[in-house]
Image (spheres, rainbow, N blue to C red):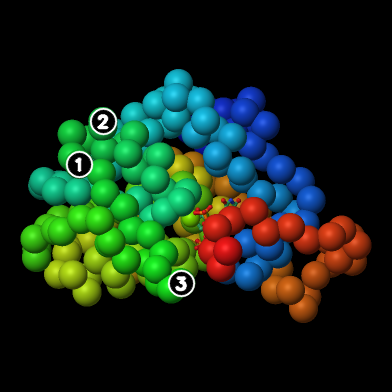
Amino acid sequence: MNTDEVLGIFREAGAVLEGHFILTSGLRSPVFLQKARVFMHADKTERLCKALAEKIRAAVPGPIDYVVGPAIGGLIPAYETSRHLGAPAIWVEREGGEFRLRRFEIAKGSRVVIVEDIVTTGLSIRETIDCLRALGAEVVAAACIIDRSAGKTDVGVPLIALAEYEVPAYPADRLPPELAAIPAVKPGSRNI
Ligand SMILES: O=P(O)(O)OC[C@H]1O[C@H](OP(=O)(O)OP(=O)(O)O)[C@H](O)[C@@H]1O
Ligand SMILES: O=C(O)c1cc(=O)[nH]c(=O)[nH]1
Ligand SMILES: [Mg+2]
């Protein structure tokens, strides 16, 4: 599946929003990919995640013990991708602001692949890697449906993206005037 097909699915679902958005990194952007409007459709989610699972299988030699989704956005794509990889899906969720594996135990040396929805700066994936490595897991790769950095983000492990779609994002004190004129909204779950 190529980037145009992935974006076609997002557009069909009404998931490509325009306005003034505060991203999880604090950056501001005129475009927000509201993945929840895609993941509400099982057929669309299945098509995307089956293709992502095939890309992961081709890139990751050896066994995968767990697929890990960073909540909330990573929950559904990690679960659906895990179904096609034949590995169990678990998740990290925020406790006091930090990602924790609150509901599961994994053996030291477990080989895990992180599956995210969207990557912008890679911050959320790096936080997930820190949490998993502290538990003794081996993070063999990270994957996402759309990489908004278009390959520029370095998360410290191979990043497998189903699509790369570069979208502008600005520090809050360097907004273009047309963006500054629109009231900002923060759709994500960090800090709420
Ligand atoms: O690469 P980054 O700069 O970290 O941005 C991408 C992250 O932002 C979103 O999560 P968010 O914290 O907004 O909450 P959500 O998972 O509930 O949507 C998205 O789900 C990714 O996890
Ligand atoms: O960077 C983010 O926080 C972000 C961007 C985006 O397009 N979609 C999303 O869910 N999060
Ligand atoms: Mg998220």
The quadrant in which the C terminus is found is bottom right
Can you tell me whether the CB of the residue at mark 3 lies under 8 Å from the nearest atom of ligand 1? no
> What amino acid is at disc 1?
Pro
Secondary structure, mark 2, is: helix
- Percent across and percent down for residue 106 are 14, 58
Residue 70 spot, x, y in % from top left: 39, 55
In the shown orientation, is residue 40 left or right of residue 66? right
Q: Which residue is mark 2?
A: 84
Residue at point 47%, 49% (across, down): 73
The residue where tag 1 is placed is 88
Tell me what residue is drawn at x 30 percent, y 72 percent.
Answer: 130
Q: Residue at x 45, y 43 (%)?
A: 145
Q: Disc 3 designates what residue?
A: 97
Return the x and y of residue 188 as percentages of the image width and height. 59, 56
Q: Position of residue 20 (x, y in %)?
A: 77, 57
Find numbered disc 1 in the image and state the secondary structure of the residue it sits on: loop
In contact (CB < 8 Å): disc 1 and disc 2: no
